[in-house]
Image: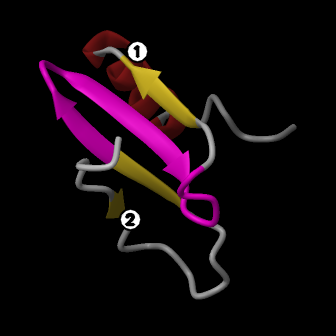
Amino acid sequence: MANVAWIKSSRSGVNGNCVEVAFLGEGRVALRDSKDPQGPVLRFTRGEWTAFIQGVAEGELRHP
């Protein structure tokens, strides 16, 4: 993952609590914690990423 172009959200604050996303090609997407760039990376297929983004947009991931 060393040669991957990571993108941080334009909504990221100065406190460093951010995630970064990388588009890997063939519809694959990677996600990581910006505070730990050498840490674990979540990888998604195109369908998984689409479902995740839709869930966020529809409020499915809100804490009760």
Position of 49 relative to 61 (above/below)? above
- Say which amino acid is labelled 1: Glu
Dot 1 lies on which element?
A: helix
Q: Position of residue 44 (x, y in %)?
A: 40, 21
Task: For the N terminus, give its image quadrant.
Answer: top left
Looking at the rendered image, the disc whose residue lies closer to the viewer, 2 or 1, is 2
Q: Does the CB distance between marks 2 and 1 fall below 8 Å?
A: no
In the image shown, does 54 or 47 lie closer to the viewer? 47
Give the magenta-colored segment's residue range.
Answer: 22-38
- Say which amino acid is labelled 2: Lys
Q: Is residue 36 left or right of residue 26?
A: right
Specify whether residue 25 is painted magenta: yes
Q: For mark 2, what is the residue?
A: 8
Location of residue 10 by image quarter:
bottom left
Q: Residue at x 52, y 37 (%)?
A: 56
Q: Count numbered badges in the picture.
A: 2
Identify the residue at the far front of this view: 2
Q: Residue at x 81, y 41 (%)?
A: 63
Q: For mark 1, what is the residue?
A: 48
